[in-house]
Amino acid sequence: MNTKIFVAGGSGFLGQRVVKKLAEQGLVYCQTSLEQGVDFRDFNQTLNYFKQEKPTQVINCAAFVGGIKFGLDRAGEIFYNNSLISANLIEAARQVAVERFINPISNCSYPNVGERKFTEADWWQGPLDESVMVYGMCRKMSWVQAYAYHKQYGLNFINLLVPNMYGPGDHFAEVRSHALGALVMKICQAKKENLPAVAVWGTGRPVREWQYVDDTAEIIIRSLTIEPFIEPVNIGVGQGVSIKELAELIKKLAGYQGQLVFDATKPDGAPYKAMDISRAENIFGSLPKTDLREGVKLTIEYYNKKFS
């Protein structure tokens, strides 16, 4: 059977980068999204697309997600949309007998385990932070479905636990963005408008791991050819940076001369999110790790070119 790779959510932030890499490697693929006319919340639409395209492998880049405020304000929509998207894509993949389903899962699905790197053994060791509980549990349940379908139907999966992503093409909006994209937007706007200060949500103390989106896409492409395994595996850079340090880096690289004002009345979210990637390094070999400074520089350049 000839390989054909379906990228669900191919018009999104991660999906676009995955599609670009597939095209560069000359691999046969198809891609669609809600924006392009297929609503994965509708099972009939989803199944009809699978039957029409007959993919042999699936990469799920489709999600309804945003930053902390987005998650708190739209919890019901996040639960409904993401539950249906994952359930329908995996069931449609089963019905057309795909060979492999690659399932990226946000690391917000980890519980709070203290200020140390998360290992895969920590994944079920407690409740999730309230700020990300709904989305994190939806992504966790996508693994439960993967486990169930592997056990009963033999469907093969690669489940990748992924940190926050950033880079050109990200969302740049205070509500929809994750912290890095929102900070790039606010600091670049402040510089353009010569504002004296930029407000940063929270205390600045929380630690986050950031992976350049092209690096995530590269690991996903590698997942097409490795031996499948059902247990989730951490991918990323293996270290975190505080929001304060991140904001100061963006300020410096953007050339902004004003002040950063941390608003402690706004929620911090989980105190620490960074992962141990030793298992992934055993599976994939060396992982791509774009330097944070270089990645932020490219993100700022993209933002200024697109929105100036």
Image (cartoon, helix red, strand yellow):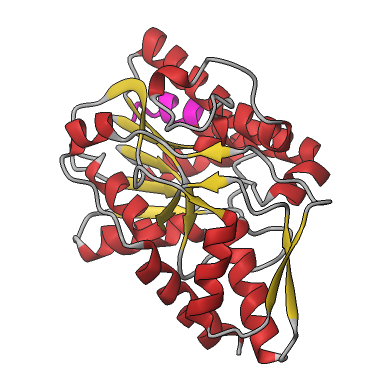
- Position of residue 88 in the picture relative to residue 42 (left or right): left
Rendered position, 66 above or below 271: below
Instruction: Look at the image and say whether residue 50 sits in the magenta stretch.
Output: no
* Quadrant location, the C terminus: bottom right
Q: Nearer the viewer, residue 168 or 277?
A: 277
Instruction: Look at the image and say whether residue 97 sits in the magenta stretch.
Output: yes
The x and y percentages for residue 85 are: 59, 37
The residue depicted at 51 percent of the width and 78 percent of the height is 252
The residue depicted at 36 percent of the width and 51 percent of the height is 216
The residue depicted at 38 percent of the width and 46 percent of the height is 6
Residue 111: which quarter of the image?
A: top right
* Quadrant location, the N terminus: top left
Q: Nearer the viewer, residue 24 or 135?
A: 135
**Magenta region, residue range:** 90-98
- Position of residue 303 in the picture relative to residue 174 (left or right): left
Q: Is residue 140 visible?
A: yes
Q: Nearer the viewer, residue 63 or 84?
A: 63
The x and y percentages for residue 230 are: 34, 20
Our reading of the magenta stretch's main secondary structure is helix
The x and y percentages for residue 256 are: 59, 84
Rendered position, 277 above or below 20: above
